[in-house]
Image: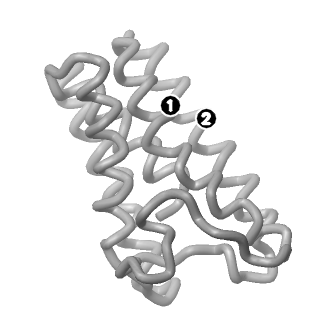
Amino acid sequence: MWVCVHALSGLSLGALAPLGMALTVVGALALHLLLDLVPHWDYTRDRRRLVWAAADVAVAAAAVAALVVLLNLPARAVAAAAVSALPDLDVFDALLQRPRRHRLFPSHWRAFPHGEARPLTGVPVQAVVAFASVAAVLVRSL
């Protein structure tokens, strides 16, 4: 999944789940792992991967910041957004075409059943997750 999808779904978890900070962090990591199982398209093998990555991270940061400020979301929402997105730093070397190193996060391991799809189906799946996450926060906050 893209960074923005992980960030927005984590934000939703942190904003909506009445959990303490420790459980929110654990939940955000579990959410990242679960979303990586869903068939989706990753841009890490695309020739424009650096452009995709820059846009992805910019959208994630801007969307999370805007929602936090506009809706006055709690600190645990910010923490969950960051924690859910941070495991994708594990695949940063794929953007630079460096030799593949050992992945630290379980859903990035070669043996993990990472969901893969072509762009035509994988991008809409991610859009649905992102929009549903934002919609849930908006409905609850307004």
Quarter where residue 49 is shown: bottom right
**80 to 30, vertically: above or below:** above
Q: Is residue 104 rendered to the left or right of residue 10?
A: right
**On screen, residue 10 above or below 141:** below
Instruction: Depth check: give the residue in front, 31 or 142.
Output: 31
Tag 2, which secondary structure?
Answer: helix
| Image quadrant assignment for residue 61 | top right
Q: Residue 50 sits in which quadrant?
A: bottom right
Give the tally of numbered discs: 2
Q: Amino acid at mark 2?
A: Ala
Question: Horizontally, is 41 left or right of 43 in the view?
Answer: left
The residue at the point 68 percent across, 43 percent down is 58
Residue 7 locus on image (x, y percent): 46, 42
- Residue 61 numbered mark, or none: 2
Q: Are marks 2 and 1 in contact (CB under 8 Å)?
A: yes
Q: Position of residue 3 (x, y in %)?
A: 55, 52
Q: Is residue 117 above or below residue 107?
A: below
Taking the image as drawn, is residue 83 in sight? Answer: yes
Residue pointed to by mark 1: 64
